[in-house]
Amino acid sequence: MRTSSIPSLHSARRRWAAAPAAAARPEVRWPQRIADSRAARDIAARRRVRRTVTWREGMRCEVDGRELLNFCSNDYLGLSQHAQVIAALRDGCVEGVGSTASALVCGHHALHATLEREVADWLQAPAALLFGSGFTANLAVLQALLQGGDTCVQDRLNHASLIDAAKLSGATLRRYPHGDADGAARQLATHEGDGLALIATDGVFSMDGDVAPLRELATLARTHDPLLYVDDAHGVGVLGPDGRGSVADAGLSTQDVPLQLATLGKALGTYGALVAGEADLVGHLAETARGHVYSTALPPALAAASIAAVRIARTANDRRATLHALIQRFRDGANEHGLDVLPSTTPIQAVMAFDDRIALRMSQVLEDAGFWVSAIRPPTVPEGRARLRVTLTALHTESEVDALVDALARARDAAGVTPLSA
Ligand SMILES: Cc1ncc(COP(=O)(O)O)c(C=O)c1O
């Protein structure tokens, strides 16, 4: 594949080639691999670009010098800017910033312990364990629980961290069609030998916004004995009684779902994640989960901010009511305009473009109109399933949602896509 249009790689190649160790090699192959990979992304319209936010207030922000209305953050309750959360962070760092070590060495602060206790209490689980992020938690949990000879059964659209976690664990990974509990049962039936089985599913699917068939999966787990692990990164704070998430919303408890993941970086507006569930399982993870044992504990101030966020989220029924009314308003408007939106009752609303270039074009037209909605393309979603991932928050207003729907319809028309109703 041609690389001559990528000058930075050429200069890197010259530098590497000049080094004595590299000179002995027939060809400097790393730059080639990177250039090929980048060129392949270019050809497929799959370059990924980070945008720089220079300012934000509510859902308004400045991105690369331009003011936009943000419809792609996961700050579903708007807590990332809540005055009490900010004050707790500030007050929490008067003793210092870093936790200075992993939890098992000397990094476990009383604020971490309080956060674990309060999240366990909120989710009505006997115990909870804090991790640096949801991604780390998923890797750590599945690695700590699974081993060679075990089977890990997963929804095909699970988050990347769950898929990677199963691969790292040494267990056999078996994926079932999206949302298909019967498919999960069929995959489970392939499990043989003395190993154990675990079913892992997103509670709310991060790119589609729909909810997993948790009751059916719980029934399967009751009758066939696999451990059920629910990653509720996008459900906690948003769904269920007191925002306890998709597990509680399905009327399930720790007896049905012995372990679940709650992330702090989405509806809670801070950073980090907790795994909540049966005391023995959580205790086992506290001693063996590598992402917990071998990683510096979160700054205590972040735990303080998260405690404040959890306390607000538990009682934020007004914010949840606003959010769910906006979700319904968005869906009604999208329906009227013939937009192709996947079924979802959550803040994640996927407006389908299917084609990568159409998704990019629509995103650009929206940005020109003052709306920030990122285009999601493979490999984040399956081939031919590119989309605009709209996310709604309690801080949006009705008129902003209406304006977004109008702009989406215009973007769809500009991209030459036929409306559904036509
Ligand atoms: C379903 C799901 N699980 C886990 C994660 C990772 O969580 P974190 O962002 O805290 O690493 C994400 C993040 O996007 C997610 O969508």
Image (tube, rainbow, N blue to C red):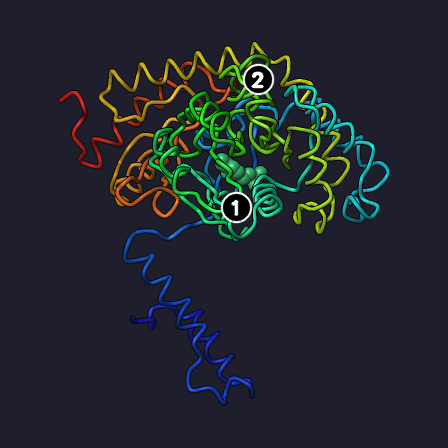
* Label 1: how many Cα within 10 Å (few below 14, some 14–19, many 20+): few
For the point 49% across and 22% down, which residue is it? 393
Q: Secondary structure at mark 1?
A: loop
Most extreme residue toward the front, as rendered? 193
Q: Which quadrant is the N terminus positioned in? A: bottom left
Near-viewer residue (264 or 13): 264
Q: Which residue is mark 2?
A: 243
Q: Is residue 54 visible?
A: no
Tell me the amino acid under the disc marked 2. Gly
Quadrant for residue 400, please give it.
top left
Residue 301 at what x, y percent from top left?
76, 35
Location of residue 365 with respect to 25 vertically, above or below = above
Near-viewer residue (158 or 399): 158
Residue 91 at what x, y percent from top left?
80, 30
Near-viewer residue (29 or 68): 29
Tell me the amino acid under the disc marked 1. Asp
Q: Secondary structure at mark 2?
A: helix
Q: Which quadrant is the C terminus positioned in? A: top left
Quadrant for residue 174, please give it.
top left
* Mark 1 and mark 2 residues within 8 Å of each other at the beta carbon: no
Q: Which residue is mark 1?
A: 194
For the point 25% across and 24% down, which residue is it? 339
Location of residue 331 with respect to 364 vertically, above or below = above
For the point 44% across and 29% down, which residue is it? 71
Q: Which mark is residue 170?
A: none
Along the polypeptide, which appears first: circle 1 or circle 2?
1
